[in-house]
Image (cartoon, helix red, strand yellow):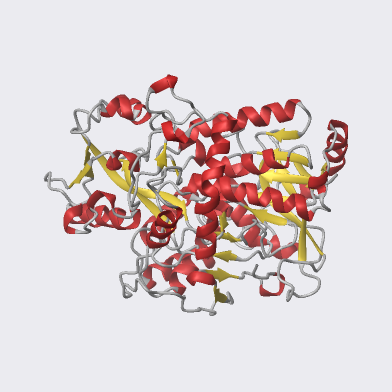
Amino acid sequence: MRHVVVIGTGIAGLTTALRLAGTQAVTLVTKDRLGDSNTTLAQGGIAGVLSPDDSVAAHIADTLAAGAGLGDPEAVRVLCTEGPDRIRELAETGVRFDRRGGAAADPLDPDHWERGMEGAHSAARIYHSGGDATGRAIIDALVAAVRAEAAAGRITVRTETMLIDLVTEPRGKTCDPAAAAGAPAVTGVRVRGRDGVVERIAAAAVVLATGGAGQLFAHTTNPPAATGDGLAAAIRVGAAVSDLEFVQFHPTAFAGSGFLVSEAVRGAGALLLDARGRRIMPAIDPRAELAPRSVVALALHRTMAEQNGLPCHLDARAIPDVDARFPSIAAHLSIHGLSLADDLIPVTPAAHYVMGGITTDLEGRTSIEGLFAVGEAACTGVHGANRLASNSLLEGAVFGARAADAIAADLDGATTGTATASDIAAASDAATATDSAAASGPSVGETTTAAAHAVRPSPLSRTVLQALTWEHLGLERTAAGLTELLDRLGAGPNDHPGWGAGDDLRPGDDAPLERHDIETANLALIARTMAERALARPESVGAHVRTDAPHRPDATRAEADTSAGTPVTTRPGGRTTLFPHTEEAASC
């Protein structure tokens, strides 16, 4: 009986925890309420081939094409091949996908499910629940299953508990047999509970399912909790990360609020108009409104620049019963006195999804022993330079299941037996203790390298950081702008009272260990890493647009920039992998 800690309760984290329940002692940790995540906000649906008039080969081709040729073909094959079974399992768990024939149709028979079309797909293969509430339906079903497992004593749930950092110790076994002896292994986590007490939770395996970092930008569709906590913690302990220069900006966020207006609305026939009422996309791409998101978002961004910042408009007035088809969107717009059926909807691009993340193999293993990553926090290579619409929920389900199976197999063949509730409770109790050492500072581990991994405060306030990243790390980038951002993040004056530029972030009278402070520190670290990667790729490809560099759709590798001591290597399919601490990280 071994203890596994899963951080994050979106589709990836919940899937992982449920699949491990009963075979391992599982502690599921979430920063807010159980199920609060980007998944909850997902409107567009989940993509998969469940119809005889479509093919897995076509889904694979669409995914690779949307990724501008930089996706990992084997990862994409796994995603699209295993995806249909994971979608069926969601239905069996209780997700009710929209059906033709209404309530009388068999909810478990995909032949009765409605299929939608979205951008850059060659066939209608998007499955929705509640019209535009697919993510909420998935979370409700998975959370209900987790609560049942928790009631049976097979999962321990910790809400309002924030990851501070990973606990490491030297052990010498990683997913790369060539890794140096003495490389760190993750042996647990440090967390901040709802009462502010810092605890250390020991674990045989830690799964980071902490989602993306949309709050890095001034305009985002992501919830306030999307601050990249797992990604930042992984960077601090030297885990390899990949493709962080690729950030997807969704074309149609409701102007002003960042509320997402789903791609499915365009899939149903909505048009994009400029401030004068003229269509934007036909002159840009033959697929018009259904071009890949990177293409549509950039077109709207440039159109807004030409019209002095005025938003573009989404015209859905010709879609029959449009408000009924998209009830969540309609309800939000009604608060602002607007209707999809009657009005032009002002929209702007907003940060939506990070294609890169913690480098993993196809079973969630990272470059550090004991550490796994799934969902948006991970980079398997499935998205390449631009994510295909509605592949993110699929990724969480597919690779969450794969990681759980790998962990169970790794932990001494634990899948062969079923643990009793008392076994699980004993393992969980033994793994958790208030950490008096951690209370003096959230540095990582008890080893001599701990100080190198301490949480460093951001040299910039959250507002200033978000404004700078939107300007220099947004839809269009330049070497000059990226360099300015790095300068501000590196040696600029600290504008947060009570923190010195070189101090660790520690609790105390002058600098209490507050959630906002940790989050901002995480965002600053991610911004620096992203900017380094964006500067090191002197080309425009997919969602990474350098206005001072050529567009090279056949690009397959990044230009290495080691001036900051950050080696870069090329991964399969053109992925680029960052090793923040070469002596401690290995590619897997």
Give residue 238's position: percent from left, percent from top: 67, 65
User: Where is the N terminus found, in terms of image quarters?
Assistant: top right
Quarter occupied by the C terminus: bottom right
Q: Residue at x 30, y 69 (%)?
A: 547
Which residue: 41% across, 37% down?
43
Q: Quick one: which residue is furthest to the top in this view?
A: 104
Identify which residue, 177 or 55, lies in the foreground: 55
Determine which quarter of the picture holds residue 446.
bottom right
Considering only vertical position in the picture, is 247 above or below 547? above
Across and down, in percent, residue 566 comes to: 58, 74
Q: Is residue 265 left or right of residue 389?
A: left
What residue appears at the point 43 percent right and 35 percent down from the top-left corner?
111
Q: Which of the 4 quarters of the picture holds residue 177?
A: bottom right
Foreground of the two, 554 or 470: 554
**Image point (19%, 32%), residue name:** 317
- Quarter holding residue 68: bottom left
Vertical position of residue 268 compared to residue 203: above or below? above
Exactly how many numbered labels are in the figure? 0
Res. 483 in view? yes
In the displayed structure, 66 sits above or below 513; it is: below
Residue 497 visible in the current orientation? no
Nearer-the-camera pick, 173 or 302: 173
Rendering coords of residue 206 (x, y %): 72, 51
The relative height of residue 562 versus residue 87 in the rendered view (above or below) is below
Q: Position of residue 158 (x, y in %)?
A: 70, 35
